[in-house]
Amino acid sequence: MKKKTIKDIDVAHKRVLLRVDFNVPLYEGIVADDTRIREALPTIQYLLDHQARIIIASHLGRPSGGGHFESTFSIMPAAMRLIQLLGQPVTVVGGSQIAGEEALSASLALKDGQIMMLENLRFDDGEKANDLNFVKRLVSLCDIVVNDAFGAAHRSHASISGVLEFVPGVAGFLLDKEVDTLTGMLAEPEKPFVAVLGGSKVSDKIGIIDNLLEVADSIIIGGAMCFTFLAAMGKSVGTSKMEEDMVDKAKGMLEHAKEKGVKLLIPVDVVCSEMFAEGSPTKTCNVDEIPDDMMGLDIGPKTVELYSKEILDAKTVFWNGPMGVFEFPSFEAGTKGVAIAVAKSQAKSIIGGGDSVAALKKFGLSELVTFISTGGGASMQLLEGKPLPGVEGLQDK
């Protein structure tokens, strides 16, 4: 990445606004998965070791905003988990006003190696609106901005891009690692490079597929979006979820792949049901024989075998999106089969966040892949070749 990191500047005795992504799942007021907090620890520890004065800022969930404190979305559980992991105090401020006078006083009182944390940024509507007044309040708290929130780097919010217009900004270790890994995968992947794409909509993945067609050797298609491709191939898809307005685009991608010599793999069989419901009777169908009154909800066993072989022969694998409705046991076999293949593969395996990560965790395979991105939306935007506001505004090396 051609942006400065915390190693390129002097942080000693400076007030550092550290934007992290502590948007973690909670269960009964306790952090249910602390992965994102742990991922930020190297940056936090570096700042502590180099005598910085740290102001941590994050959003959490989707509060109603309007300047109201909502206990359900308080950042406090994340702060408590951070205290446990670091073994040192972290003071949470700003319950009444985010980045208000209380926060300013607390930031000015910080000593080297101390940490304070702002309450949930999204309690203030100015965060998502990138409101200038809110930006200036955040700016008043700090001398330097460190962005380590890759999961939010695609958003033009006050704490992501707004502050960078007024205060020098550099990358934390996590942001740097994420950008380097994903851009490096596109620039110089070890071949064969296999991309596995699932999810429901072709329209969500157009830019990514177009980009991957320039660099991948094989692109594997699963999830509901496979039915748009099947329709583009002239096949009947029954009542399966399908984007009628994307059929021509899918047809163009199939032709482009053929021209480029890229294998674009589409399912050869699918698991069907009459209803989108767990427990509904299932039937495995060849893609030429999907009944008119049934919908496909997972890839079939022949497809799992085909996809697994392709993955196991790869040297680089990128995976984003499930193969079916893996939340229901009746329709999890396709996603599980692909997850097992990715985990068994000797390839460098890069997981693009979101449901793919959830699937790996469900099947106990998350420790067996090379790299898991902490930002689904940000990783997708980066792979489309679009700039990330939280990266663009950082200082160049």
Image (cartoon, rainbow, N blue to C red):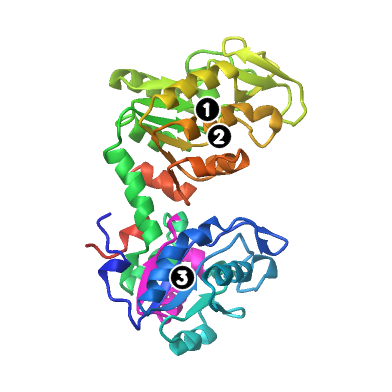
Seen at 42% across and 64% down, the residue is 42
| Left or right: where 161 falls relative to 72 | left
Q: Badge 2: few (under 14), some or many (20 or more) residues near its Cα, within 10 Å?
A: many
Name the mark on residue 232: none
Name the mark on residue 322: 2
In the image, residue 29 lies in the stretch drawn in magenta? no
Percent position (x, y) of residue 94?
57, 79
Look at the numbered disc 2 and give the secondary structure of its residue: loop
Where is 208 relative to 263, above or below? below
The magenta span reads 126-150
Where is 129 relative to 287, above or below? below
**Residue flagged by tag 2: what amino acid is it?**
Pro
Q: Please say if the residues under marks 2 and 1 sit with CB atoms less than 8 Å apart.
A: yes
Seen at 27% across and 65% down, the residue is 395
The residue tagged 3 is 131
Q: Nearest the camera: 124 or 90?
A: 90
Q: Quadrant of residue 61?
A: bottom right
| Left or right: where 130 falls relative to 328 | left
Percent position (x, y) of residue 238?
64, 18
The residue tagged 1 is 222
| Left or right: where 243 falls relative to 239 | left
